[in-house]
Image: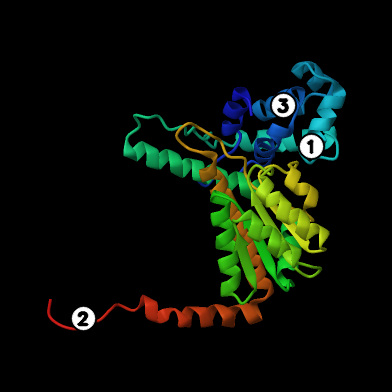
Amino acid sequence: MNADLKGTFIDGVAVGGAVPDPLAAKVRTLAPSMTRSMQRVAEAVTADPAACAALTVTGLAERTGTSEATVVRTARLLGYPGYRDLRLALAALAARRASGRSPSLTSDIAVDDPVEAVVAKLARDEQQTLADTAAALDTAQLAAAVAAVAAARRTDVYGIGASGLVAQDLAQKLLRIGFVAHAHSDPHVAVTGAVQLRSGDVAVAITHSGATADVIEPLRVAFERGATTIAVTGRPDGPVTRYADHVLTTSTARESDLRPAAMSSRTSQLLVVDCLFTCVTQRTYETAAPALSASYEALAHRRAPRQRTGPR
């Protein structure tokens, strides 16, 4: 994402208790897949929604130095059937911004920032990431993914690096409520497991970039074997989605020298995983609740304080 887009879009989403801005969240996620002319349109509508809402499609094209076709394509990429729908959304966004809520602050961390500032900035970034993810998450896709996992004979989850930690988190959560679930961070083991999947099974690929080959390959194999496939990714147009029946979009992390993208991407991935797990638990509560209780009781002795056996 270019620097102009980055600075503008930070102001486009409220944090710290304010209602998240779905339009800016979509732009954050989709900007990397836009052409430069489409980015100019996106930058304009997020920077000044009130003025853009008053423009015709021709007027906005002239304002951004693009074409009417580019404006319409941008509107559709952002999820609106046409330019009229985008104008209505811009008018609503302008009204919200006029309500008096303070814009969010940038949160890049400098090498000489004190500890207190680092904590405050990271907290704001986490809030921003969660707000962006919640606003952009397609609940229809989530519901379909929930239904697939809830009915699955087996669920395999693929992830590498930081995404591998999230894959383990999802698999462990599913195990706690009685599901057969495996997390794979070794690509060879992942493909070997994917070969065994079939219709009625589920494969979940977690990749922020949407282009991690070691995650895409087992998902492709699972897809070809007839399993239901789910991609959790920050790039809804990335290669991983070619083999995904359902796509759950995470926030596009804002990178800096001190804060790798893996930190923000992990936060958004964990939110999506928690949403998926919680909804699956709701859907299967009659069996999930006893399984969760049994696992809790089985581990209870490990939480008990150790007794002293003699004098010090």
Residue at image coords 57%, 54%: 164
Label 3 and label 1: CA atoms lie apart by: 11 Å
Spot occupied by residue 58 in the image (x, y as percentages of width and height): 85, 21
Q: Is residue 273 left or right of residue 114?
A: right
Relative to 91, say whether 177 is above or below.
below
Look at discs 2 and 1 and give the one toward the viewer. 2
Residue sitting at the far left: 311
> Residue at label 2?
308
> Residue at label 3?
39
Q: How many marks?
A: 3
Which of marks 2 and 3 precedes in the sequence? Answer: 3
Identify which residue, 163 or 270, lies in the foreground.
163
Do labels 3 and 2 touch, CB within 8 Å? no
Local SS, label 2: loop
Label 3 and label 2: CA atoms lie apart by: 66 Å
Q: Residues within 10 Å of mark 3 (few under 14, many from 20)?
A: many
Among the 4 quarters of the image, the one containing residue 11? top right
Among the 4 quarters of the image, the one containing residue 155? bottom right
Q: Quadrant of the C terminus?
A: bottom left
* Residue type pointed to by label 1: Leu
Local SS, label 1: helix
> Residue at label 1?
77
